[in-house]
Image: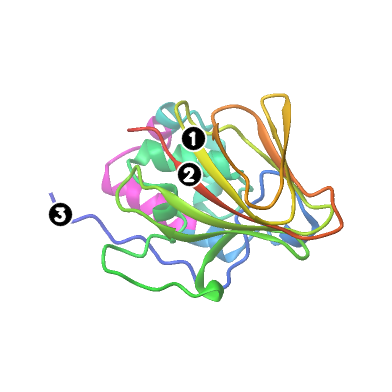
Amino acid sequence: MPDEPAPTPAPDAPSPVAADTPNTADAAAGSAIARVVATNLRARRTDRGMTLVELAERSGVSRRMLSLIEKAEGNPSLGTVERIARALGISFAAIIGADPGSAPHPVAPEAMVTPWRSASGHGRIAVTGEGPAAVELWDWLLAPGDHYTAVPDPAGARELILVVSGELTLTHDGTTHLLPEGHAIRIPSDRPYAYANHTTRPVRFTRNTLPPPL
């Protein structure tokens, strides 16, 4: 079997694929990351000899949506992209072009892939582990008034959150948690959850995503 094609890397400082919650700064539907996802999805699917129907059955994403994503015309949530990646046997970071490989490689903020943006905030992947079940380290900044409502991750997924500055409002499975600076929490992310900043100061936090085993 020939070697798998290397994922197409994301360009520097890209626009987001699509936020799970719409935001005015996310208006570019045909964004740079969407094009990277389209290229990597098509390459991985064809390399595995999978039809769109087969991928739809494995991922739970409709064939029509998959077809649109392969043309960089869809507007999938981050959760949808995660499900597609897992069905293809690769990590979320790999399908969006954020996998730096195995060699030590410092990543500057401007080079981090940024799947979510607001007018003044961001959710970007700082570094990732290796393999289809790689841990991802995210750097999040929520400006006053920002919010992010996630689509639940696959069953068994977890997140580890540490607030670096400000106060984060985390709503998880119907319960609200206020996390001041220095506080941390672990949540099962396969349930409804959301981040918000209800204060007048920016909130900075790190998030480690731990996907379930494939």
Residue 139 numbered tag = none
Tell me how far mark 2 sits from mark 1, CA to CA.
6 Å
According to the picture, the residue beneath numbered tag 2 turns out to be: 209
Question: How many neighbours does mark 1 have within 10 angstroms: few (below 14), some (14-19), or many (20 or more)?
Answer: some
Amino acid tagged 1: Arg
Kindly tell me whether residue 147 is visible in this rendering: yes
Mark 3 or mark 1, which is nearer to you?
1
Kind of residue indicated by mark 2: Thr
Disc 3 from disc 2: Cα separation: 31 Å
The stretch of residues the image draws in magenta is 37-55
First in residue order: circle 3 vs circle 2: 3
Is residue 90 found left or right of 118 in the rendered image? left
148 or 162: nearer the viewer: 162
Element class at badge 2 = strand
- x and y, in percent, of residue 71 in the image: 53, 54
Disc 3, disc 2: CB below 8 Å?
A: no
Q: Residues within 10 Å of mark 2 (few under 14, many from 20)?
A: many
Pick the front one: 41 or 160:
160
Residue at horizontal 56 percent and vertical 55 percent from the top: 72
Which element carries disc 3, helix, strand or loop?
Answer: loop
Magenta part, dominant SS: helix
In magenta stretch: residue 204: no
Q: Which residue is mark 1?
A: 158
Residue 116 appears anywhere in the view? no
| Residue 156 quadrant | top left
Which residue is pictured at 36% across the width and 47% down the height? 134
Q: Which residue is mark 3?
A: 2
Q: Amino acid at mark 3?
A: Pro
Residue 56 horizontal/vertical position (percent): 45, 31
Distance from disc 3 to disc 1, alpha carbons, whole Å, reads 34 Å
Most distant residue in the front direction: 182
Left-right relation of 74 to 119:
left
